[in-house]
Amino acid sequence: MKIKIVNPNSTASMTDKIRRCAEALAAPGTEIVATNPKDSPASIEGHTDGALAVPGLLAEIRKGEADGCDGYVVACFDDTGLDACREVANGPVLGICEAAMHAASMVSSSFSVVTTLSRSVPIIEDLAVKYGMERRCRKVRASDLPVLALEEKGGRAREVIRDEILRAVREDRCEAVILGCAGMTDLTAWLSAETKIPVIDGVAIAVKMVEALLGAGLKTSKVGAYATPRAKEKAP
Ligand code: 5HY
């Protein structure tokens, strides 16, 4: 099977990191393809960045359909453009937020999320409600790290995230923590060892869930919300 991961921001180093982490746990026989649009924002921090990223994201999904990809992961924790991608794709399309929240609810009775800037917090809180997770999600926390701080070599990003996770365990009574940015995907094992609780990376979980859905013969339903878009001409 061929799974295409699309990082909706245009930071190629993050896309490459995501690809490496996904390849490390993909099953034998699963081919991982990872791409990003060339002209979307370098990072997605809030609604405007997210909206600007959607055209390039959809173009990558369309290319995947032409290239015979079997399933997709939208590798941005805002689950940017996820519903539109499901209209365009035939195979399963998972967002890393939705996948991580469902995984967390299967290994714990409650979880918190540690994301980047505080402006992302209400977006993720809305997703928890959309996914029916408001009872399980104790809190969405900001580390106050800009997304691209996660790309800086020699920075203190992982220590900052670790300390926020420890605060979450102490203050939120959460039993697991979700990493609220695709750019954190390479920190999972270290953070879990440091904090002694399940630390969940949506990239990893989404790849394994797409494998599971495809293995069970499931594709996106085309009889309603995710029906293929009707052909439209641009108005003259
Ligand atoms: C992400 N932004 O996963 C989100 C995280 C965030 O460029 N990749 C981004 O801060 O909303």
Image (cartoon, grey):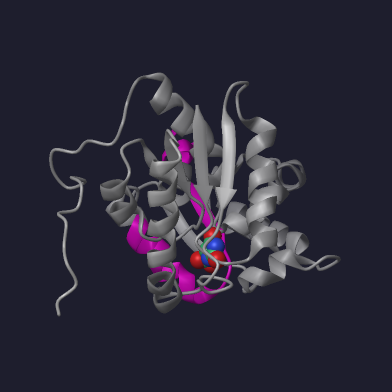
- Residue 174 in picture, x, y percent from top left: 52, 48
Horizontal side of residue 224 vs 75, given as left or right:
left
Q: Residue at x 14, y 54 (%)?
A: 230
On whether residue 92 falls in the magenta region, the answer is: no
Image mark count: 0
Horizontal side of residue 142 vs 21, given as left or right:
left
Q: What stretch is highlighted in magenta?
A: 102-127
- Residue 231 in picture, x, y percent from top left: 16, 56
Q: Residue at x 13, y 38 (%)?
A: 223
On whether residue 123 falls in the magenta region, the answer is: yes
Q: Nearer the viewer, residue 207 or 31?
A: 31
Q: Residue at x 44, y 64 (%)?
A: 56
- Residue 168 in picture, x, y percent from top left: 58, 57
Q: Which of 44 and 34 is in front in this view?
A: 34
* Residue 191 seen in this snapshot: yes
Seen in the picture, residue 114 relative to 208 is either above or below; the reply is below
Q: Residue lying furthest right in this view?
A: 154
Seen in the picture, residue 167 relative to 46 is either above or below; the reply is above
Q: Nearer the viewer, residue 78 or 17?
A: 17
Horizontal side of residue 38 vs 106, given as left or right:
right
Q: Residue 189's quadrant in the figure?
A: top right
Seen in the picture, residue 199 relative to 75 is either above or below; the reply is above
* Residue 109 seen in this snapshot: no
Magenta stretch, overall SS: helix
Seen in the picture, residue 61 relative to 142 is either above or below; the reply is above
Q: Residue at x 42, y 20 (%)?
A: 215
Q: Nearer the viewer, residue 49 or 232?
A: 232
- Residue 236 in picture, x, y percent from top left: 15, 80
